[in-house]
Amino acid sequence: MEPLLAPASGPATAAARGRLSRVATLVAGTGVLGYLAAVDPARGGAYPLCPSRLLFHVDCPACGGLRGTHDLLHGHLGQALDHNLLLPGYLAVLAVAIGLWMLPLVGRPARVLRAPRWLAVAALAVVVVFTVARNLPVSGLSYLGSGAG
C-alpha cells in the first residue's frame, strides 16, 4: 500500500521545482533591489560589513558596490563610479548570468555563462590590479578607493 503523502518525483516535478526556484530568486532579487533603492547604505540600514574593510582596513574589489548600486538605481552614474569603478562590469556580468539562468521562465532552456579562458584570466588580472591600486597610499590613485571609512 502506497502512503497518501508520498513525495512526487520525476521530470515534471523537477521542472516545477526549477521554475519555483527561479521565480523565488526573481522575487527575492526584486525585493533586495527595492530595499537597496529605498535605504541608502551610506546612511545605515541592514547591510553586511565588508570583512576586508573590518579586519584589514582595505577595500576589497567589491567595496563600494552597495553604495554604487544605490546611486545607479537613482540614476547617478558618476557617484556610482566614484564608489567602485568596476561596478558596471560586475553588474553586467551578474545580469547576463541571471538572465541566462532565468530563460526557462519564458520557455527557453537555461544556459550557463561561459567565458573564454583568456577573458577570464584578463578579467581576474584587472580585478587584482584594481584591488592593489585602490589600496596604495598614492594621492593620484585615491579616486579608486570606495570612499568608505
Image (spheres, grey):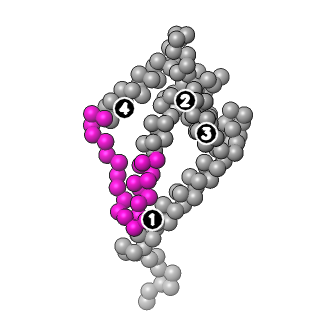
For marks 4 and 3, give the one nearer the viewer: 3
Q: In this view, does 29 lie above or below 15?
A: above
Classify residue 102 as left or right of residue 45: left
Distance, label 2 to label 4, CA atoms, is 18 Å
Labels 2 and 4: the sequence-earlier one: 2
Q: Mark 1 points at which residue?
A: 105
Amino acid at the residue labelled 4: Ala
Residue 75: assigned label? 3
Q: Estimate the x, y position of residue 129 in percent, counting from the top left.
A: 41, 22
Labels 1 and 4: the sequence-earlier one: 1
Distance, label 2 to label 3, CA atoms, is 12 Å
Asked if the magenta segment contains residue 96, the reply would be: yes
Amino acid at the residue labelled 3: Gly
Labels 2 and 1: the sequence-earlier one: 2
The residue range painted magenta reads: 95-119
Q: Quadrant of the N terminus?
A: bottom left
Asked if the magenta segment contains residue 131, the reply would be: no
Residue 117: assigned label? none
Which structural element holds mark 4?
A: helix
Compare residues 147 and 53 and report the one nearer the observer.
147
Which structural element holds mark 2?
A: helix
Q: Estimate the x, y position of residue 102 in percent, counting from the top left.
A: 44, 58
Q: Estimate the x, y position of residue 120 in percent, counting from the top left.
A: 32, 35
